[in-house]
Image (tube, rainbow, N blue to C red):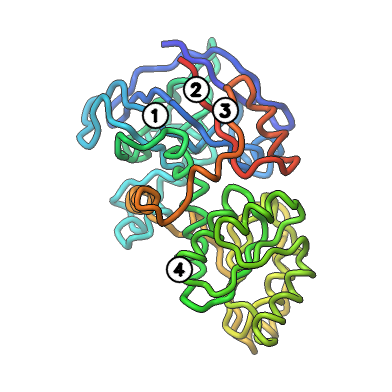
Amino acid sequence: MKTRAAVLRDVGKDFEIVELDLDEPKTGEVLVRMEASGLCHSDDHLRTGDIPVRYPIVGGHEGAGVVERVGPGVERLKPGDHVVGSFLPVCGKCRFCARGMTNLCDLGRLLLDNSLPDGTYRYHEGGTDFGQMCLLGTFSQYAVFSEASTVKVDDDLPFDVAALVGCGVPTGFGTAVNAGEVRPGDTTVVYGVGGVGINSIQGAAHAGARCVIAVDPVAFKRETALKLGATHAAASAEEAAALVLELTEGVGADQALITMGVVTEEVVTAAFDAIRKRGIVVITGLANPAKQTVHISGSLLTLFEKRIQGALFGSSNPFDDIPRILGLYKAGKIKLDELITTRYTLDQVNQGYEDMMAGRNIRGVIIHEH
């Protein structure tokens, strides 16, 4: 079948809207009619080269839609099911899945060449194969997902809201409650208030943090953070450091969560300096893998038992935490509608990323047309 999709042909290029051929779903796969797709910063990392992948590639790894057809051997899903794409596939069988660390599933090895689990591709343009961002490619009207990347959700959920829990919401929420171990009464600092950081703020507040400090140079983002769980806001790391000392009587923050779009050495150092003895820095944001962004005092690391923790998908379990977070939304415990700043058509994808980089959006969402 034919599908319109936003693709990247190489590093440094903008998204291009093209018509591609899409194969039928094979064994263990489903064809999904995409309804909504979130504009996550990670897709811009494909454009800049901060995430090295095989090109050309269909963008998008945060999306929701409806199953149209299923391939042989699919047992959990059927046509008509509403689903969210998990940007981390889960095989359920490898060593890490067996230990409950499904966000570290061995199928993650496919994320660089972006083929489906059988090592082949479903999108084509003439003789050229196109990969799928995180095995999904949600910037397409239709997509073929592996069953290992497809999470069934309730039919009564809005697609634009459901799309957000494919990446940004669980990543941010889990950064606070899983990797950051936020407990009632804690003081938590969040560096970067975008689609991930705003949900770290919600997660910290939900876990009972006494003080949640949002750090972002953009006034609109600080104002939004104060509406969704932050108790304080700072325009810079230096301003946040002074707030931490004041609020904790000089002890330091319990957690410093780094959720900015591009992580820098300066923010890691500021976060490390802001935490207390045995406090934890969680690094969720990305940077070019060739850059060394963590330079801290080994003596202070040892003497104060400070910790630095990486977090992929907020150390969350896709098939458990995606429905769990949507349940919290339906119960009114967290806010998701308020995260969507602007809705775009597929043809406006580059405008969406321009708005993101200019600080005009918390989260932009593509609404697909069929």
**Residue where numbered disc 1 is placed:** 65
Tell me, yes or no, whether the two marked residues, 1 and 2, touch with CB atoms within 8 Å: yes
Disc on the earlier residue, 4 or 1? 1
Q: Residue 344: x, y in percent? A: 59, 26
Above or below, 193 against 18 in this view is: below
Residue in the image at 39% along x and 17% along y:
23
**Residue where numbered disc 3 is placed:** 57
Q: How crowded is mark 4: few (under 14 residues within 10 Å), some or many (20 or more)?
A: some
Mark 1: amino acid: Gly
Q: How crowded is mark 3: few (under 14 residues within 10 Å), some or many (20 or more)?
A: many
Disc on the earlier residue, 1 or 3? 3
Q: Residues within 10 Å of mark 1 (few under 14, many from 20)?
A: many
Identity of the residue furthest to the bottom in this view: 303
Disc 4 or disc 1, which is closer to the eye?
Answer: 4
Using the numbered discs, state the Cα–Cα distance from disc 2 to disc 3 in whole angstroms.
18 Å
**Residue where numbered disc 4 is placed:** 207
Mark 2: amino acid: His
State the residue in front, 359 or 333.
Answer: 333
Disc on the earlier residue, 2 or 4? 4
**Residue where numbered disc 2 is placed:** 368
Tell me, yes or no, whether the two marked residues, 2 and 4, touch with CB atoms within 8 Å: no
Q: Is disc 1 placed on a helix, strand or loop?
A: strand
Residue 99: image quadrant is bottom left
Using the numbered discs, state the Cα–Cα distance from disc 4 to disc 1 in whole angstroms.
30 Å
Disc on the earlier residue, 3 or 4? 3
Q: How many labels does the image show?
A: 4
Using the numbered discs, state the Cα–Cα distance from disc 3 to disc 4 in whole angstroms.
38 Å
Mark 3: amino acid: Ile
Using the numbered discs, state the Cα–Cα distance from disc 1 to disc 2 in whole angstroms.
10 Å
